[in-house]
Structures are given as structure tokens and as C-alpha cells.
Image (cartoon, rainbow, N blue to C red):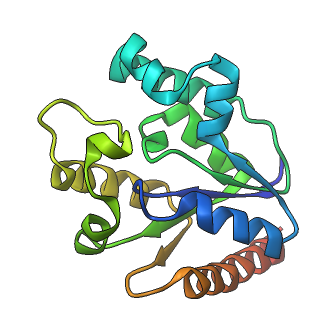
């Protein structure tokens, strides 16, 4: 399967869903929020899955469902913890261009607030700083493109993303 999707990864609060909806409109693609797909397929809210299955159980469900996404010409906004799923990330990387929406830790703390209030998957006692450092390495590992969002509003982030995505897709087409 060709890489027809744009897959957004990044920390909670970096704007994957908001940027994703606008990108989908501009690029004339379908928008898919993988967290909503997980909720639809399980019949539970994410926090209910975590309460029932625990963090590891949730990550396993997330990995399985994200690895089974069969969409084309879509912008997919993943949950912030999607990068823990190696099967899912392999599948998403085969079917799409993986774009990391990167925020500095300082900018993220301004946007995010509390991990608990936001429903962010994290281990007991794990701080936002710990989570940021752990996940940043994974986001960078899987990213085909990195969009630095610091000091950018939504319009500037989307504009930068469109430009970099179009350049990457043009380059990829030239190598086929």
C-alpha cells in the first residue's frame, strides 16, 4: 500500500486534532481521530478503558486498533501514547507520512495543564517532564517530518505543515 496518509504524532496538547482537521480540509482528505476510533470499536471512553484494563491494557488495545486502521488519503490524528505501539507505528509508517508536531516543554506546560485533568496516559508518579522526555525520543524515532510549533499560532503551524508535507510528498513521488 502506498503512503497516502498523513499521520500526526506528538504530545497531548500539541494540536494534533485541531491541526489535523484544518490540514484535512486544505489537502482535501478525510480526517480520522484514532482516539475516537478506539472509543467506537471498544464502546468505551478512553478513561474507562484505562480504568478497566490499566495502562498496559489500554496501550495494547491502542496498538491493536491503530495497527488495523485501513484508510487512504486521510489525515490521522493519533493519541499521544500511540508511539508506544510498535505494530501500530510500523503500520502507520507503511501507509502514511508521519509528522511530529513538536512543542518545547515550556510551551507544552502552558497549553496542557494537569496530566490528570487532560486524561493523559502516564504511570503513577510520572511527571509531565518525565513523560515529555520519554515520548520525545519515540516521536523523533518515528517521524518522517518534524514541525516545530513554538511561537506559532494555528494558521502558521498549518501553513508550515502544508509546505513541508507537500515538499516531502513531491520528493517521495520523484523517488518512485
Left or right: 161 with respect to 24?
Answer: left
- The residue under the point 49% across, 29% down is 46
> In this orientation, which residue lies closer to the viewer: 51 or 95?
51
In the displayed structure, 54 sits above or below 6; it is above
Residue 75 position in % (x across, y down): 73, 58
> In this orientation, which residue lies closer to the viewer: 21 or 146?
21
- Furthest toward the front, the residue is 117
> In this orientation, which residue lies closer to the viewer: 55 or 119?
119
- The residue under the point 40% across, 22% down is 50
Q: In which image quadrant can residue 52 be found? A: top left
Residue 96 position in % (x across, y down): 71, 55
> In this orientation, which residue lies closer to the viewer: 41 or 136?
41
Left or right: 114 with respect to 156?
Answer: left
Screen quadrant of the N terminus:
top right
In the displayed structure, 44 sits above or below 103; it is above
Q: In which image quadrant can residue 163 be found? A: bottom right
Screen quadrant of the C terminus:
bottom right
In the displayed structure, 176 sits above or below 37; it is below
Q: How many marks?
A: 0
- The residue under the point 33% across, 59% down is 112
- Furthest toward the top, the residue is 52
Amino acid at each position: 500500500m502506498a503512503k497516502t496518509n498523513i499521520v500526526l504524532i506528538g504530545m497531548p496538547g500539541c494540536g494534533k486534532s485541531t491541526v489535523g482537521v484544518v490540514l484535512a480540509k486544505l489537502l482535501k482528505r478525510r480526517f480520522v481521530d484514532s482516539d475516537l476510533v478506539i472509543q467506537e470499536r471498544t464502546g468505551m471512553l478512553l478513561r474507562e478503558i484505562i480504568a478497566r484494563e490499566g495502562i498496559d491494557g489500554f496501550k495494547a488495545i491502542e496498538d491493536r486498533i491503530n495497527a488495523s486502521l485501513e484508510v487512504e488519503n486521510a489525515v490521522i490524528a493519533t493519541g499521544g501514547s500511540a508511539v508506544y505501539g510498535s505494530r501500530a507505528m510500523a503500520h502507520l509508517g507503511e501507509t502514511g507520512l508521519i509528522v511530529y508536531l513538536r512543542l518545547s516543554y515550556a510551551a507544552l506546560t502552558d497549553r496542557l495543564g494537569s496530566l490528570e485533568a487532560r486524561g493523559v496516559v502516564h504511570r503513577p508518579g510520572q511527571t509531565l517532564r518525565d513523560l515529555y522526555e520519554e515520548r520525545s525520543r519515540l516521536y523523533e524515532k518515528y517521524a518522517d517530518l518534524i514541525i516545530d510549533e513554538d511561537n506559532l499560532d494555528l494558521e502558521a503551524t498549518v501553513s508550515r505543515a502544508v509546505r513541508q508535507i507537500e515538499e516531502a510528498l513531491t520528493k517521495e513521488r520523484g523517488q518512485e
